[in-house]
Image (cartoon, grey):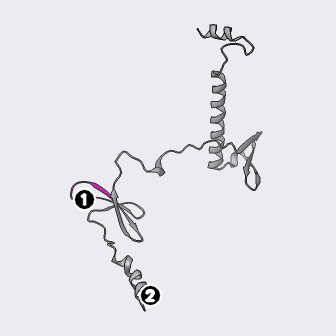
Amino acid sequence: MKLAVLIGLLAWMPLLAEDSLPAGAMRVGPNSYVYTDQDGNKKLVRKTPFGLSIHQAPPEGLKPAGERPRELKDNPMLKIEEQGDTLTFRRNTPFGEQVWRRQRSELTPLEQEMIAARHRTLEKEKEAAKSAKPDSPPGAPKSQREERND
């Protein structure tokens, strides 16, 4: 009997939560609304299964994470081999090496980003190699290296 009463109360809990949106709330996303309270502060309201969740709205200049431009980073576990118009992708996975081939004209947007990331990494490595020139020959005595630095 007690169990039945407890289950009945829990079933009505979501209905007891306040589900009415504040007056003047504007929809900004799925289950998300913005409104200005009596003090002039912007509030973000989200509908959850447990009722409304009200938070301070983010500043105007701040972009949501989904709108920031994302730049794919080079993956050292991925190797890209170019053979004419055909590209061969090799990725190490826990289950072994995954290999696939594509024509340049058939590349998906993700594959194009992977190639661009690989080219950026190669360019950075070339620039680092150019800037890391030794001051003196590797076999030169320490005294010659110190004189060149002065």
Q: Quadrant of residue 130?
A: top right
The amino acid at mark 2 is Leu
Task: Estimate the spatial distance between the alpha carbons at disc 2 and disc 1, rounded to whole Å.
Answer: 41 Å
Q: Earlier in the sequence, mark 2 or mark 1?
A: 2
The x and y percentages for residue 60 are 34, 47
Determine the residue positioned at 31% across, 71% down.
20
The x and y percentages for residue 17 are 34, 74
Task: Give the dominant element type of the magenta stretch: helix, strand or loop.
Answer: loop
Tell me the element at label 2: helix
State yes or no: residue 22 in magenta. Answer: no
Q: Nearer the viewer, mark 2 or mark 1?
A: 2
Q: Give left or right: position of 138 versus 7.
A: right
All told, the count of numbered labels is 2
Q: Give left or right: position of 84 versus 111.
A: right
Is 8 situated above or below 88?
A: below
> Which region of the structure is painted magenta?
37-43
Crowd tier of the residue under label 2, counting other residues whose Cα lies within 10 Å: few below 14, some 14–19, many 20 or above: few
- From the image, tell me which residue sits under label 2: 3
Q: Which mark is residue 37?
A: 1
The amino acid at mark 1 is Asp
Determine the residue positioned at 21% across, 55% down.
39
Q: Quadrant of residue 126?
A: top right
Q: Which mark is residue 69?
A: none
The x and y percentages for residue 133 are 66, 19
Tell me the element at label 1: loop
Pick out the residue farthest to the bottom. Answer: 1
